[in-house]
Image (cartoon, rainbow, N blue to C red):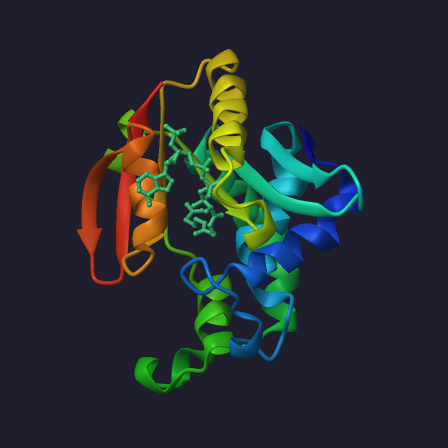
């Protein structure tokens, strides 16, 4: 049995761990990264810090372990600006910019460090209709039982209450399972770039 509840600051380490353990197109990425925190710094930590009212977790009632999360932000452009001011600067001191290393020669850690120094901005035409975005990850023991849908329903409800009219998300091109999940929930494919697919949903 799982409880779905708002995330709290004490969940931070669990969010980072789940992010890593689902970080290879939905599969465990632990073996790929020398630094076990670097993925969480990009895809989990800033949401708990700057948008905690749009962060929800699944807790295993027996063990008390956090088994999954959905993390969102209602206004991606404002979130990007906030991260530029407060989140990225200390991480840039921690992780050197690998810009001088040829792209093809970069390690997985260096690819994420490059994102920390040069975070991509969401396309403004996508944001015009789909200003919010999200990340969702469940550990294998929590997948496939309707809990991903439950987390999405909870986040979408919170975004609707906040007056948000649409949200988008990016998913790895090879993560076909998650793509099927999003299509099943009514998301439309907006664009496809090498390695990544962007989906959108009007609220
Ligand atoms: N194709 C079609 N339908 C699907 C698929 C699929 N691949 N996967 C699930 N569904 C359907 C289910 O049948 C179910 O249908 P129903 O509610 O109408 O009966 C519905 O979608 C909900 O399925 P859940 O059981 O809630 O899905 P789950 O709990 O497994 O959550 C998720 C899906 C989030 C992709 C989960 O498997 C997961 O975390 N995987 C690993 C991490 C991952 O890939 N995360 C996405 C990264 S991309 C990003 O965060 C933007």
Position of the C terminus, as image quadrant, is: top left
The quadrant of the rendering that contains the N terminus is: top right
Figure quadrant, ligand 1:
top left
Q: Image check: 67 left or right of 125?
A: right
Does residue 182 sit above or below 84 in this rendering? above
Q: Is residue 114 above or below residue 87?
A: below
For the point 65% across and 59% down, which residue is it?
17
Q: Position of residue 191 (x, y in %)?
A: 19, 45
Residue 163 at x, y percent in the picture:
45, 13
Most foreground residue, 63 or 95: 63
The reply to whether residue 97 is visible in this rendering is no
Which percent across, then down, holds residue 24? 45, 65
**Closest to the observer, 96 or 71:** 71
Total numbered labels placed on residues in the image:
0
- As drawn, 6 above or below 191: above
Q: Measuring 30% from the left and 46% from the top, which residue is drawn there?
A: 179
> Seen in the image, is 99 located left or right of residue 195?
right
Q: Quadrant of residue 175?
A: bottom left
* Residue that appears at 54% across and 31% down: 151
Kindly indicate the quadrant of the structure image that contains residue 173: bottom left
Tell me which residue sits at (49%, 33%) in the image.
Answer: 146
- Towards the viewer: 200 or 79: 200
- Horizontal and vertical percent position of residue 66: 71, 45
Can residue 45 be spotted in the picture? yes
């Amino acid at each position: 049995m799982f409880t779905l509840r708002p995330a709290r600051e004490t969940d931070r380490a669990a969010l980072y761990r789940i992010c890593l353990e689902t970080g290879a197109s939905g599969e465990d990425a632990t073996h790929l990264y020398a630094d076990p925190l670097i993925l969480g710094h990009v895809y989990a930590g800033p949401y708990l810090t700057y948008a905690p009212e749009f962060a929800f977790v699944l807790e295993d009632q027996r063990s008390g372990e956090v088994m999954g999360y959905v993390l969102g932000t209602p206004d991606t452009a404002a979130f990007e600006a906030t991260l530029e001011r407060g989140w990225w600067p200390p991480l840039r001191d921690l992780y050197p910019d690998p810009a001088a290393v040829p792209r093809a020669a970069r390690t997985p850690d260096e690819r994420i460090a490059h994102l920390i120094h040069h975070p991509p901005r969401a396309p403004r035409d996508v944001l015009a209709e789909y200003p919010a975005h999200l990340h969702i990850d469940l550990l294998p023991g929590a997948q496939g039982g309707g809990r991903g849908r439950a987390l999405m329903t909870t986040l979408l409800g919170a975004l609707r209450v906040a007056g948000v009219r649409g949200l988008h998300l990016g998913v790895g091109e090879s993560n076909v399972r998650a793509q099927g999940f999003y299509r099943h929930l009514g998301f439309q494919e907006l664009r496809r770039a090498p390695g990544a697919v962007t989906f959108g949903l009007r609220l």
